[in-house]
Image (cartoon, grey):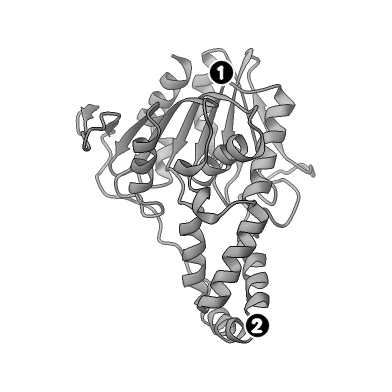
């Protein structure tokens, strides 16, 4: 096993980016995304519909875009509208926010250390995820659930997010409610920009240019913001987020490391730790990552 330690990684004049040695093999183990067997038929339909009726094609694309393909499940479920979880009884609260097609308990590895340090930890299954109700969700809806959780517990000290959960948390503070504040924010596997997600959807469905443009316009109308302004570095949060720790793997096959570097350049109160060999998902379960996150929240 390689020695564990930190090595400063300089990029231009930025000194808030470091390599975090975890001892993991330096090869990402992210599973390759499986394409639905009916994808070719869906692409054919979108090529035809997109040319004949681009608005209708945009509506259909939005239907699929806002519906998770799968739900992360437990063996036992409670029939609640928004499934929530809570540990500890500290005066200060840390909120966990999961990724798309995941669930709140995916981040449970951080609970023991935080509770031992006197924090209360809460999380939830986002709408249409896990054991929560609903069949669809989108960024504003996801962020609305975050706002509801923060209001329910009377404010939070910190938030730990994974991938899509990061942009949802920033959107909640920057677009939904400027009273939301995070003393400490952790973003594991910093999410793709909404623009990049939409472009990937358009490419996957092979939508004609006009239909793709209408699809983006529909998203902008719902989000009440131009797509280009839905990237984390472009969302104005003022002093609502005091300190940010980002941890991203060098060979993340889901989200390129460059997105985390962009945020590190823009947010001067942020720190970026780069791992090797943990990929997009193992990142949130590695003991060294858990240790660094716990130290950041508790110090």
287 above or below 278?
Answer: above
Q: CA distance from mark 1 to mark 2?
A: 54 Å
Image-based side of 288 in relation to 61, left or right: left
224 above or below 32?
Answer: above
User: Is tag 1's residue or tag 2's residue first in the polypeptide sequence?
Assistant: 2
Where is residue 11? Give x, y as percent. Answer: 22, 37
Image-based side of 78 in relation to 231, left or right: right
Image-based side of 266 in relation to 61, left or right: left
Quadrant for residue 68, please give it.
bottom right
Residue depicted at x 73% and y 44%: 77
Residue depicted at x 72% and y 34%: 148
Is residue 68 visible to us here? no
Q: Decide: marks 1, 2 in contact (CB < 8 A)? A: no
- Quarter of the figure that contains the C terminus: top left
| Residue in front for this viewpoint, 220 or 189 | 220
| Residue in front for this viewpoint, 5 or 159 | 159
299 above or below 195?
Answer: above
Judging by the rendered image, the residue that carries numbered circle 2 is: 53
- Quarter of the figure that contains the N terminus: top left
Query: Would you call the spot at circle 2 few (<14 residues within 10 Å), some (14-19), or many (20 or more)?
Result: few
Q: Secondary structure at mark 1?
A: helix
Judging by the rendered image, the residue that carries numbered circle 1 is: 115
Q: Secondary structure at mark 2?
A: loop
Is residue 137 visible to us here? yes
Query: Would you call the spot at circle 1 few (<14 residues within 10 Å), some (14-19), or many (20 or more)?
Result: some
Q: Which mark is residue 262?
A: none
Where is residue 20? Give x, y as percent. Answer: 28, 32
Residue depicted at x 52% and y 46%: 164
Quadrant for residue 24, please give it.
top left
């Amino acid at each position: 096993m390689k020695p564990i330690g930190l090595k400063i990684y300089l990029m231009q004049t930025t000194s808030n980016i470091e390599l975090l040695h975890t001892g993991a093999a330096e090869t990402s183990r992210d599973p390759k995304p499986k394409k639905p067997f009916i994808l070719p038929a869906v692409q054919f339909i979108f090529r035809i519909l997109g040319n004949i009726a681009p608005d209708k094609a945009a509506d259909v694309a939005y239907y699929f875009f806002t519906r998770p393909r799968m739900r992360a499940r437990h063996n036992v479920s409670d029939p609640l509208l928004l499934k929530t979880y809570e540990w500890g009884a500290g005066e200060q609260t840390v909120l966990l926010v999961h990724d798309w097609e995941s669930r709140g308990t995916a981040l449970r590895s951080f609970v023991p250390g935080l509770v031992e340090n006197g924090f209360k930890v809460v999380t939830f299954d986002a709408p249409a995820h896990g054991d929560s109700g609903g069949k669809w969700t989108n960024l504003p809806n996801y962020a609305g659930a975050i706002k509801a959780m923060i209001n329910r517990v009377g404010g939070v000290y910190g938030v730990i997010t994974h991938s899509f959960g990061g942009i949802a948390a920033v959107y909640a503070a920057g677009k939904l409610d400027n009273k939301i504040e995070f003393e400490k924010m952790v973003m594991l596997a910093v999410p793709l920009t909404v623009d990049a997600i939409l472009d990937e959807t358009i490419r996957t469905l092979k939508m004609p240019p006009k239909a793709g443009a209408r699809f983006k316009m529909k998203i902008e109308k719902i989000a009440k913001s131009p797509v280009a302004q839905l990237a984390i570095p472009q969302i104005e949060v003022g002093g609502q987020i005091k300190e940010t720790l980002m941890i991203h793997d060098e060979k993340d096959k889901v989200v390129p490391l460059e997105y985390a570097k962009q945020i590190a350049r823009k947010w001067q109160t942020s720190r970026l730790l780069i791992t090797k060999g943990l990929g997009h998902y193992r990142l949130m379960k590695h003991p060294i990552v858990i240790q660094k996150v716990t130290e950041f929240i508790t110090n």
